[in-house]
Image (cartoon, rainbow, N blue to C red):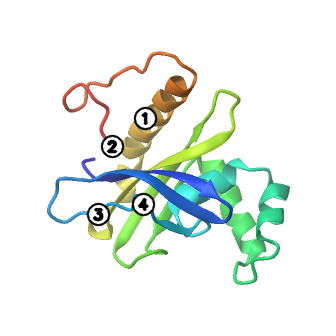
Amino acid sequence: MQESVNLIVLAGTEARFIATAESAQVLRVGSRAGRSLPAHLTSGGKALLAAMEPDEVTALYEAVGEVDLPRLRRELALVRKRGFAINDQKTEAGLTAVAVEIRDTAGRGVASVAPAMPSVRFGRERLPEWLSALRTTAAAVTRALAGGPVRQGKVGQGKVRV
């Protein structure tokens, strides 16, 4: 994929970007590490919100007046069904991101991994390939959280690249 990839956690109604592996491409999405954006707009935030119980999401957003809660619930139901979330230019014009959740050993969503790219390079036909790489990465992180071995992929130089 060779795009910038972010590790994201929830902080209330915000998606906090913990770390970024920035792409080497000239046209790329720069590091978001240390930034927070509204979770309901980011792919990583939506992946984590979808992992929550619906009543938890309601409790989190009831007091947030600018969020259309019924619409958010519908969108999160779609994310749950698909198993991934997309941010298509909701946080920044010309930026598209895809995310899957990372679960802890108890099966709770604790973080998300999300490649972000210039929208001109995003193509839905490539989603299966990207999602496969993202799910492999998320599973490796879950194994690492459990103290298990992290298997390396064969893409790139012994590392799974997304």
Point out which mark residue 162 bears. 2
Label 2: element kind = loop
Q: Earlier in the sequence, mark 4 or mark 3?
A: 3
Residue at (71% x, 57% y) in the render? 77
Residue with the most extreme left position: 26
Q: Nearer the viewer, residue 17 or 152?
A: 17
Give the CA distance from mark 4 to mark 3. Answer: 13 Å
Closer to the camera: disc 4 or disc 3? 3
- Dividing the picture into quarters, in which one does residue 31 lie? bottom left
- Residue pointed to by mark 1: 137
Mark 1 and mark 2 residues within 8 Å of each other at the beta carbon = yes
Residue at (82% x, 64% y) in the render? 58
- Residue pointed to by mark 3: 30
Give the CA distance from mark 4 to mark 2. Answer: 12 Å
- The x and y percentages for residue 125 are 36, 53
- Dividing the picture into quarters, in which one does residue 94 lie? bottom left
Give the CA distance from mark 3 to mark 2. Answer: 15 Å
Looking at the rendered structure, the kind of residue marked 4 is Ala
Looking at the rendered structure, the kind of residue marked 3 is Gly
Give the CA distance from mark 1 to mark 3. Answer: 21 Å
